[in-house]
Image (cartoon, grey):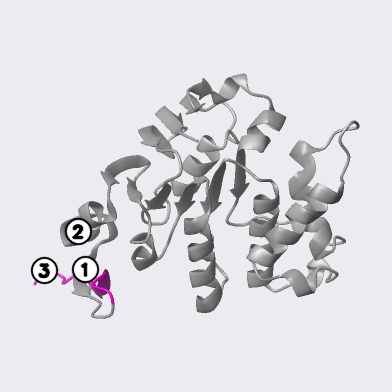
Amino acid sequence: MKIEARDLGWRNIVRGVSCEIRPGETFGLIGPNGSGKSTLLKLLAGLMPRAAGEVRLDDVPLGQLTRRQVAQRIAMVEQFADTGEALSVRDAVELGRTPWLSPLSPFGPEDTRIVDEALAAVDMTGMTKRPWSTLSGGERQRIHIARALAQQPRALILDEPTNHLDIHHQLALLGLVAALPVTVVMALHDLNQAMMCDRLGVMSEGRMVACGAPSDVLTPDTLGRIFRVRAMPMTDPEDGSTLFRFLPMEEPR
């Protein structure tokens, strides 16, 4: 699914952002804390009231779709999402099927299969009966992602999805996301992980100041200006990929 933003804005947090996210690509958002990444993701998902500009999904204005229709197209995992303490793990993931259910189409065997696959994708199959209240932060994050997968969206929006996850599950999640046959938009904190995206948008003070392939966007000059660090590119001898080592900016004497 193509997602197009036209002059998006909300108060002074996001200002005049326009971009086109191509069908099936993984688009990463990077930027310092407070640069507007989370708000922009919510704008793309249609979750911010009285927003300026327009979002179009496959050339259809998002504002012309019902909330149910939007939920059948886009699933979002917010950075600080939560759910009911009384639910079990399986209950929480089954909520992802809500946009597809109705009195004429109740929860059935196909929904069970989809939920099972979502739980397996995040390595939580053996914990389905666990109460939500007993889960760690990383386990809750994986369940939020499973719920989004159970929604079977055409676009997946993730805000800092690797937060709270150990390195094994960070890499597993990024590999899972890369393999999904959907459009993915995600904010990332780790700039080396951002190198795995097809394209990156760089946010600074509410504006998208750069957009392009990671190798074009993540340059020492841009990283120095936006993140105020010295970035030293290095080549991984294993596969030839580029990694960065970050050092503090040298203070003028």
Residue that badge 2 annotates: 219
What secondary structure is found at the residue carrying circle 3?
loop
Image quarter (top left, top right, bottom left or bottom right) of the C terminus: bottom left
**Residue at horizontal 67 percent and vertical 29 percent from the top:** 69
Counting residues from the start of the chain, the first of labels 1 and 3 encountered is: 1
Instruction: Name the mark nearer the viewer: 3 or 2.
Output: 2
| 3D distance between C-alphas at marks 1 and 3 | 17 Å
| 3D distance between C-alphas at marks 2 and 1 | 8 Å
Does the image show residue 176?
yes
Residue 231, disc:
1
Residue that badge 3 annotates: 252
**Residue at horizontal 69 percent and vertical 59 percent from the top:** 118
Q: Is residue 162 magenta?
A: no
**C-beta proximity under 8 Å, tags 2 and 1:** yes
At label 2, which amino acid type do we have? Answer: Thr
Quarter of the image where one finds residue 190: bottom left
What secondary structure is found at the residue carrying circle 1?
strand
Would residue 40 appear left or right of 202 to someone viewing this image? Answer: right
| 3D distance between C-alphas at marks 3 and 2 | 22 Å
Range of residues picked out in magenta:
239-253
Would residue 207 appear left or right of 55 to someone viewing this image? Answer: left
Depth check: 189 or 123 in front? 123
Instruction: Name the mark nearer the viewer: 1 or 3.
Output: 1
At label 3, which amino acid type do we have? Answer: Pro
What secondary structure is found at the residue carrying circle 2?
loop
Depth check: 238 or 128 in front? 238
